[in-house]
Amino acid sequence: MSDSSKSNQKLTSSKSACDSVDASLPDGKGVTRVLRDKLSSCQDAEDMFRVFARFNPLLTRTRVRAAVKEFQLQLMNTVGQAVQKLQAKFTHKYESSSASNIATIRGIPPVSGKIMWAKQMERQVHTLMKRMSDVLGKEWGQQLEGRQLRRSCDELLSKLDSRAYFRSWVTEWERELSSDTNSKIATYPIVIAKEGQAIVAKANFDEKHEYLSREIRYLKWLGYDRDIPRTIALVAEEAMERYPHASELSVVILFYCDLILFY
């Protein structure tokens, strides 16, 4: 049986059960009485959301909507506060968030970490929107009570565009590679550089390319495999081939410099 058939069967079953309750009471207010009793006995907002999700098909009835109005307003306030918290979280930016610190500790590159952060917030917004649909009905965004909240959710989702972060990263790296006139990866294995007042020898390997390799590995895991330009992927692949040799060479140079200073 398909998911849609199961959903329709569940909806029909829910309506039939409620209709039978409605018909069993002489005053014709069976459903509203049962629904209000269930909502009144809820311990917290989570319980109330579950009740509304179960009885959602009945919100098309005028009598039912009027009976649960106070509960709807209460849950709308809960969802509104949650949206405001997400907006504040976005305003403070990923770079200054605890998620960024945790990602750094776990070795997750900046752009991949930011995309994960944005996707997590997107899921939270969609969950809140689903709850509003359960509480007010499918057209909740067009209703007077839910119109402003829907606009706030849509505005936040438009800002949480993880693909925009990815495109910005691609543009930045394409600019970096096009302006790299020295072609360091293709030159000598050792370079002489000035650090402060000292002249030092060092392995000719740009650490940014090692970060690039890690970034691409995580981006592929996040589903951007086909979107990564081949030119950037090739630089990362070559960097990974050179990295072990550059690391060994750095150790040898450091040992040699220490040896000279010792003597």
Image (spheres, rainbow, N blue to C red):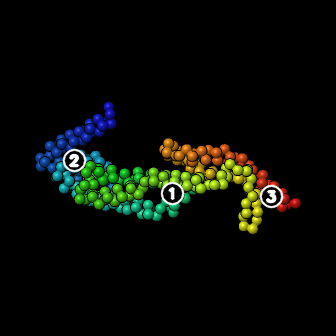
**Residue 189 x/y as whole percent:** 73, 50
| Disc 1/disc 2 C-alpha distance (Å) | 41 Å
When the figure is inspected, residue 220 is found, relative to residue 208, above or below; the finding is above
Q: Which sits earlier in the primary sequence, circle 3 or circle 1? A: 1
Mark 2, residue position:
58
Mark 3, residue position:
257
Residue at the far right: name it.
Answer: 263
Q: Nearer the viewer, residue 192 or 12?
A: 192
The local crowd at label 1, few if under 14, some if 14 to 19, many if 20 or more residues have their Cα within 10 Å, is some
Q: In this view, does 22 lie to the left or right of 192?
A: left
Label pair 3/1, CB-CB below 8 angstroms: no
Q: Identify the residue shown where x is 29% and y is 39%.
A: 7
**Residue 165 x/y as whole percent:** 48, 54
Mark 1, residue position:
99
Mark 3 element type = helix
The amino acid pointed to by label 1 is Ala
**Residue 176 x/y as whole percent:** 58, 55
